[in-house]
Image: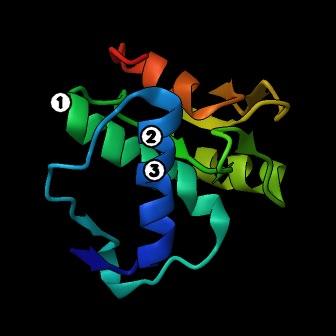
Amino acid sequence: SLVGWDSPRLAMLLAVFDARCGLRFGMRDVYLSVTGGYRIAEPAGDLAAAAALASALLDRPFPAGSVFFGEVALSGAIRSVSRIEPRLREAARLGFTQAFVPAGAPDTVDGMQVHGLSRLQDLVDVLGGDSE
């Protein structure tokens, strides 16, 4: 079930998890909802959706105060998105303390710890996920 998210985009994320990370969603019901009635159309939301999906499947939370943004490619690579620095500054201003973003982003922003990810498997590894 989807609310505020593109169905083909979700199917792509699930396929990438399966092919590149060994996380199998195939026999599970998957629910993804964007709060507040918003609709996410920009690829920068891929990493946030992927984080929620991996966390739910593995039953392991990310640290409180975490924010995620980046595009997930079919290869499993985490691609850069526009306006990374302003996004990080705004997230820090809103009280987020950790950011998981594409590799190559600034290492620190206003005391926020920034984690650069090169591939989707890196995200799974943060959770200590057993895959491949």
Which residue is pictured at 37% across the width and 20% down the height? 127
Point out the image quarter for the N terminus: bottom left
25 or 123: which is nearer to us?
A: 25
Amino acid, disc 3: Ala
Between discs 1 and 2, the one toward the N terminus: 2
Please give the residue where the numbered disc 1 appears in the rendered image: 59
Return the residue nearer the eye: 66 or 53: 53
Which residue is tagged 2? 17
Q: On the rendered structure, is 68 left or right of 81?
A: left
The structure residue drawn at horizontal position 34% and vertical position 38%, both measured from the top left corner, is: 54
Q: Residues within 10 Å of mark 2 (few under 14, many from 20)?
A: many
Q: What distance separates the C-alpha of mark 1 from that of mark 3?
A: 19 Å
Residue 98: horizontal and vertical position, in percent?
54, 31
**Callout in the foreground (1, 2):** 2
- Report x, y in % for residue 19: 49, 37
Is the residue marked by circle 3 packed among few (<14), some (14-19), or many (20+) residues within 10 Å? some
Amino acid type at circle 2 is Phe
The residue that disc 3 covers is 15
Q: Residue at x 59, y 36 (%)?
A: 99
From what the image shows, is residue 52 above or below residue 19? Answer: below
Which of labels 1 and 3 is toward the front? 3
- Residue 130 in which image quadrant: top left
